[in-house]
Image (cartoon, grey):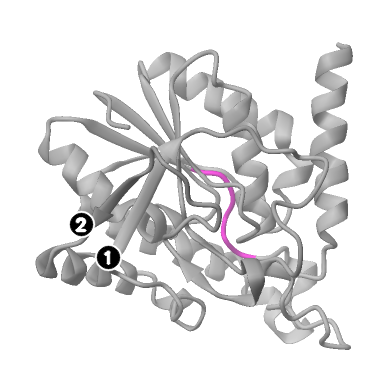
Amino acid sequence: MFGRNILVLAPHPDDEVVGAATAIRRASAGGASVKVLYLTTGVPARKVLWPWQRRDHPRRVATRIDEAREAARFLGIEPVKFLTTPTRALKSAIDQTMSEIEKTIETMAIDRMWVPAYEGAHQDHDVAHYLGSRFRDRVPVSEYAAYNFAGGIVRSQSFFDSRCGETVIELTDEERSLKRRALDFYESERGNLGHIETVRESFRSFREGDYSRPPHGGTLFYARFQWVPFRHPRVDYTRPSDVCLAVAAHAFGNIKG
């Protein structure tokens, strides 16, 4: 899973810590150079916010970037770029994001890429997994577990379909403390990170997803609160089937092309 020049795809600023903080520190200690490409702002589009919050949208984005830079300094990693796609919109920016990944691989001599698993944690995570699949012929790709809700159970840093061949990093007491400190840099996300454990991190070789269907049956993590009858900014009301349609349409278009 390690290389000399590792690129971590973070769907949002904080996912590099959630899924890979300890792996990043261990890779760096072994002499690797770790870069992070942040695929979205981590902040919903202005129109999704409450009306009285919308004028504050630029500050929310700037705050998230500042938090990511602080976390990066703490972990000793290099931010490559902060892309401007809002959270929940990565499925509509696949081509632009692929171009940024391509550019990063070429200019920074990337020899290993880490991407979030296809597990329904967040729609942007699942799109990022698809993006990883587009570069498997260029560089070896590993996937990391973030969180999921398979079987109606919240899992943190564990694959819901665990099999042989996975690398599970059991955190030492010191590493648990360091990861918690890294998560604390994302103060603006504190209310959303309470379920994140600091016990382990899990990696495995990339496994192609069937992007025409959700990662597992039942409710996906990001769809847990879609029963809320009014449009709350913190709830993602996107149907998983719509995410699958967007990704499958892109994949099919590339096959035809």
- 85 left or right of 66? right
- The residue sitting at 49% across, 62% down in the picture is 62
Labelled pair 1, 2 in contact (Cβ < 8 Å): yes
Q: Mark 1: which amino acid? A: Ala
Q: Mark 1 points at which residue?
A: 182
Label ID, residue 141: none
Q: Which residue is drawn at 39% across and 77% down?
A: 187
Q: Would residue 80 be visible to someone looking at this image? A: no
Q: In this view, does 56 lie to the left or right of 47?
A: left
The residue sitting at 20% across, 30% down in the picture is 32
Is residue 199 placed above or below 96 in the rendered structure?
Answer: below
In the image, what residue type sits under mark 2?
Answer: Phe
Span of residues in magenta: 38-43
- List the residue tagged with mark 2: 74
Question: Is the C terminus in the top left, top right, bottom left or bottom right quadrant?
Answer: top right
**Image coordinates for residue 101, horizontal then vertical, percent:** 54, 27
> Which image quadrant for residue 28?
top left
